């Protein structure tokens, strides 16, 4: 799929934003062990919180493929930030589609303007990959409102998000058909953040959790009914797997750029480091494998943008992206020698980012299981 001229311009804008804003911001986040709301605001003001949101609702109305390529550019600087801005974007995009729901619509504009952030809350302390096992409950009252109780954990942006799409069980625990999605407002009684310690190397993603204690949700807070929410999230997670794979491309690509520059500038035994054949071959191998992985990810992005069933190719793309990052981020660090461990080196973030990517939206083992089941061999 070829991006439109407007989409290509936005991807280039994201590359410049990553270089000029995110690199110094990410370094500060790691030193100070915090998320960066200022960088998120600037990204939203630049349009990155509304990539797929329809123009009529204040967004840009662009494609999934464009969003995924932008995620790749942001991850060159910081995987955690890329996840953070995409989670706000995805929250705004989901709510924007509910055009007949005033409550949902009222939460969109502040996120697009960078005045608020959003998150999707699936994971719980005892339920991650086994999504059907969530224990957060939603009980219907006679007046049509709902009462929610439970705890969410390991949620991107949970440290600061004011709007959350919370998945809760309306029936018996373990019944996928009973899961519904609710719009949860952080300012309402019954909502309490669970102190998050962040995660080394990706503090920018605002990782945390929250607890709901007799949280009252009005009827219009149901944004995905029981019987449909589970299927919807399984469809949307295919897109997430694709853009996480794209983020892996970004981390490796940035490492290659950095290594190449280092090789040109580092003298060794009377010549530049890049003059050493063995050192050059390491970068050449990384370049070749990056090109192959990128071809698969671009194919997956195009298929998802076209509305095709991407269960298989999304799993393949994420698996290949993770393997690429796991092999080459450490190798490219070593290509820098000891300077790769420097305080201002990107590699501490990217080493953490590649590990987080392997868990996000389904573990590597789950990807392999899905590939084996769907390949038909």
Image (cartoon, rainbow, N blue to C red):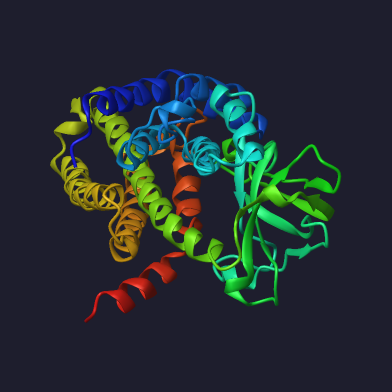
**Residue 114, quarter of picture:** top right
Question: Could you tell me residue 309's position as x and y percent?
Answer: 30, 62
State the residue in front, 366 or 237: 237
Q: Residue furthest bottom?
A: 377
Nearer the observer, 148 or 33: 148
Give the total number of marks visible in the rendering: 0
Q: Please identify the quarter of the rendering in which residue 118 is found.
A: top right
Taking the image as drawn, is residue 266 in sight? no
Q: Position of residue 85 (x, y in %)?
A: 51, 35
- In depth, the one of 139 and 22 nearer the eye is 139
Q: Residue sitting at 18 percent across and 51 percent down?
A: 292
Left or right: 7 in relation to 239? left
Q: Is residue 307 above or below residue 268?
A: below
Does the rendering let one see residue 213? Answer: yes
Residue at image point 49% right, 42% down: 97
Residue 169 in the image: state x and y as whole percent: 68, 67
Where is 105 relative to 194, above or below? Answer: above
The quadrant of the image that shows the N terminus is top left
Task: Please report the residue visible at 77 percent of the width from the left and 45 percent of the height from the top.
Answer: 195
324 over 367 or under it: above or below: above
Screen quadrant of the C terminus: bottom left
Relative to residue 118, is residue 238 drawn left or right?
left
Residue 107: x and y in percent read 63, 34
Question: Horizontal placement of 31 versus 72: left or right?
Answer: right
């Amino acid at each position: 799929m070829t991006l439109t001229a407007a989409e290509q311009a936005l991807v280039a804008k994201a590359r410049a934003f990553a270089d000029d804003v995110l690199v110094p911001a990410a370094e500060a986040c790691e030193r100070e062990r915090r998320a960066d709301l200022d960088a998120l605001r600037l990204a939203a003001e630049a349009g990155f919180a509304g990539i797929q949101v329809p123009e009529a609702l204040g967004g840009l109305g662009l494609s999934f493929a464009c969003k995924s390529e932008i995620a790749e550019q942001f991850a060159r600087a910081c995987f955690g930030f890329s996840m953070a801005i995409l989670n706000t974007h995805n929250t705004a995009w989901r709510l924007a589609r509910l055009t007949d729901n005033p409550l949902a619509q009222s939460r969109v504009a502040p996120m697009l303007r960078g005045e608020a952030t959003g998150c999707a809350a699936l994971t719980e302390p005892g339920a991650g990959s086994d999504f059907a096992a969530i224990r957060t409950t939603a009980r219907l009252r006679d007046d049509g409102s709902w009462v929610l109780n439970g705890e969410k954990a390991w949620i991107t942006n949970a440290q600061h998000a004011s709007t959350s799409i919370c998945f809760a069980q309306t029936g018996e625990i373990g019944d996928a058909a009973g899961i519904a999605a609710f719009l949860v407002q952080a300012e309402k009684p019954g909502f309490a953040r669970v102190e998050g310690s962040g995660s080394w190397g990706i503090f920018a993603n605002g990782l945390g959790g929250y607890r709901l204690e007799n949280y009252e949700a009005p009827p219009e807070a149901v944004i995905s009914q029981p019987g449909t929410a589970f299927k919807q999230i399984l469809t949307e997670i295919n897109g997430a797997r694709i853009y996480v794979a794209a983020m892996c491309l970004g981390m490796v690509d940035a490492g290659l750029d950095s290594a190449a520059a280092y090789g040109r500038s580092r003298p060794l035994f009377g010549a530049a480091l890049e003059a050493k054949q063995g050192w050059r071959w390491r970068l050449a191998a990384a370049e070749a494998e990056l090109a192959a992985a990128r071809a698969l990810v671009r194919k997956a992005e195009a298929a998802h943008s076209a509305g095709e069933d991407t269960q298989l190719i999304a799993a393949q793309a994420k698996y290949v992206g993770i393997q690429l990052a796991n092999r080459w981020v450490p190798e490219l660090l070593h290509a820098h020698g000891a300077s790769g461990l420097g305080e201002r080196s990107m590699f501490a973030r990217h080493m953490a980012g590649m590990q987080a990517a392997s868990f996000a939206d389904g573990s590597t083992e789950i990807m392999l299981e899905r590939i084996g089941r769907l390949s038909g061999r």
